[in-house]
Amino acid sequence: MLYTDRLLLLRLKITDAEAILEFYMQNKDYLEPYEPNKLPSFYTLDYHKKAIQAELIKEEQGRCIKFLIYQRNEPNYLIGMVTLNEIVKGCFQSCFIGYKISKYHSNQGLMTEAVKAVTDYAFKQLKLHRIEANIMPRNTVSLRVVEKQGFVNEGLSKGYLKINDTWEDHIHMVLLNPNH
């Protein structure tokens, strides 16, 4: 569990499927322009139970960690997620970060707060050297989140991910551990 002034960030557990499904149902239209197409089965409880099981296996293997975001004054209402994906140890000591927040909680500095807590965790607890975020140029809100943390633009990856049937360019943003 991680804390900030306004947030609780809790590690993913199997019983979170309903809250995650509700989050996606409430934010479907808001998130859709920035995410890959989703099959109708994505919006079922069964899908999220299986997805959580798969993510927990990856977590046991040390390959990912997902934090669910709650406001401290509303600890039963999921407002977002931050995930460290593709964690690689050894000489690389790196991962990708992904995050999303509900439409009702965006532009309030909450995601900036959550990303700061998770990057601190990645550097101090996991001893990672590098965190990477890939963001579509038109997603200016997301770019501001990582820029506030000190992520640096390392260039444009052309046609990086297929989002809504279009191969979208992404800006490659990187933060290095200041203690390395």
Image: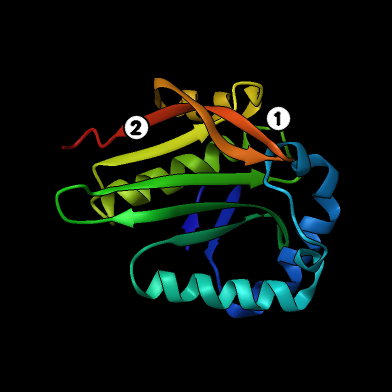
Q: Amino acid at mark 1?
A: Asn
Tell me which residue sits at (41%, 70%) in the image.
Answer: 59
The numbered mark at residue 83 is none
Between 100 and 91, the residue placed more toward the observer is: 91
The numbered mark at residue 175 is 2
Give the vertical position of 4 relative to 52 (above or below): above
Q: Position of residue 160 (x, y in %)?
A: 52, 34
Left or right, 41 with respect to 11, comes to right
Q: Give the mark nearest the N terminus, 1 or 2.
A: 1
Total label count?
2
Between 69 and 163, the residue placed more toward the observer is: 163
Tell me which residue sits at (29%, 40%) in the image.
Answer: 130
Left or right, 164 with respect to 124, comes to right
Please tell me whether mark 2 sits on a helix, a strand or a loop: strand
Left or right, 153 with respect to 18, comes to left
Give the vertical position of 24 relative to 133 (above or below): below
Q: CA distance from mark 1 to mark 2?
A: 22 Å
Q: Which residue is mark 1?
A: 107
Q: Amino acid at mark 2?
A: Leu
Please tell me whether mark 1 sits on a helix, a strand or a loop: loop
Between 17 and 8, the residue placed more toward the observer is: 17
Tell me which residue sits at (59%, 73%) in the image.
Answer: 52
Give the vertical position of 2 relative to 107 (above or below): below
Q: How is the image coloured?
A: rainbow
Between 52 and 35, the residue placed more toward the observer is: 35
| Image quadrant containing the C terminus | top left
